[in-house]
Amino acid sequence: MRVIIIAIFLSAACKLQAQFTFFSPKDAFAIEVSLDNTSLKRLPVYRNSISSLIVSGDYILGGTSADKGLSPYLFTASLSRRDMASIVDLEKIIPGQKTVQTGFCLANKNQFFAGTIGNGESADGHLMELQLKNDGGIDVKDLGVPVPHEGIFSLLINRAKTKMYGITFPSGKFFSYDLKTKVTDVFDDVAPAKKDIGKFNEFSLKPENYLCKALIEDSKGLIYGSAPVNKLFYFDPASKKFNEFAELPDVWGRTVMGQVETWAKSNDGKLYGGNAGDGQLFIVDPVTKKVKNLGKPIMMNRLRGLAFGNDGKLYGIAGALPGYAHLFSYDPKQEGFKDLGNPSFTMKSPGIEQGIDWRGFQLGTIASSEDGKYIVMGEDESLSQLLIFPVSKN
């Protein structure tokens, strides 16, 4: 009997240990972005939560969010050198901003656009044009305020590189911005109705909890996003018409929390989306407009980012505070979901040449390199770093 009890205990202990095994693939590494006690290029505490990422060639381009009353940064880091290349204090260029929430829209080579949310209620958010230089430096041009008294919550550039589309904050208006004429058109069609605001208040939801955080364009030029309450829509730029075509996958009693938080397009043109409300991955067929719920990678809500690797797998970040974020993969052809847990990558830099294992518990952003060989993740804590791993085709 004692032998049986010991065997059961050892088996349970092994399973428990397996649950807390960190994700540490070969050749993964971390880049130190934030550390105040150094003269090196680093971002200060409470202004370094990484909220936007894109990879261009050897450089990672990032944007941060700051605590209330503080201003964010733009920065670059080198994949090959594994260190910070440049930092830009946005307060010196566009004062009064709080976050670079929108991600980066690639226009032409080394040219990007992004949007900001201002500090304070009814603050103006700005459009920015960024030029990434060969040495990793960033030239920033302020393009002004597309919608007065509104921030820019999400932003997308079309494939023709002629127009940008976005969602404002906190009203949730949809807008288009013509890159040639600099003219902005504003639409109220997908903004929350007054009758719905009461529902959000019942759930203690703020605009950041129900407005559309990401937009995507299909192969025919239609723009997709979400609208309160729990609706998926597409916008036809030719007719300037909005069409609600489906509901987001939901759990009974939590429909009001539906919100598209991220998108990714596969090589076959299918649109993969993440519902923040219940943390579900779903897929939209842009031809039939049918939506398929692929399920929840983990038990928690939030699905914060998606990026395809060159192995054909979709990598994503699920979960957030008050729990830990998990890295997961989704293989459309074979294994389905795989919860990879928390990454633990070695970080080396001057002063810590021996390296330390940096563990990513609060991941906020994810992006793939242009060739899909690397997946880059950014933390959104008060001391945030970059975590990078190579994609294996084996």
Image (cartoon, rainbow, N blue to C red):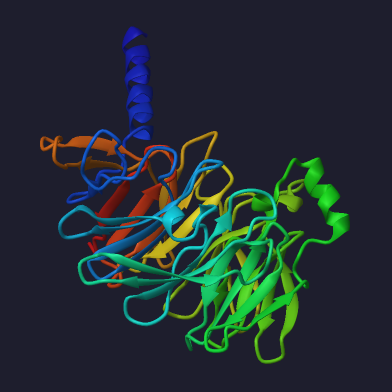
Snapshot quadrant of residue 293? bottom right
Q: In the rendered image, which quarter contains the N terminus?
A: top left
Residue furthest toward the top?
A: 2
Q: What residue is at 37 percent from the left and 38 percent from the top?
A: 383
Expressed as whole percent of the image width and height from the top left, the position of residue 107 reads: 42, 80
**Could you tell me residue 294's position as x and y percent?**
56, 60
Query: What is the residue that sits farthest to the left in this orientation?
Result: 354
On the image, the x and y values in percent for residue 330 come to 43, 59
Up-down relation of residue 157 to residue 92 (above or below): below
Give 15 or 344, whichever is nearer the viewer: 344
Q: Report whether 378 appears left or right of 155.
A: left
Question: Which one is in front, 131 or 348?
Answer: 131
- The residue located at (41%, 68%) in the rendering is 333
Q: Is residue 205 above or below residue 154?
A: above
Q: Left of 339 or right of it: where is 117?
A: right
Q: Looking at this view, is 317 or 64 the one in front?
A: 64
Quadrant position of residue 134: bottom left
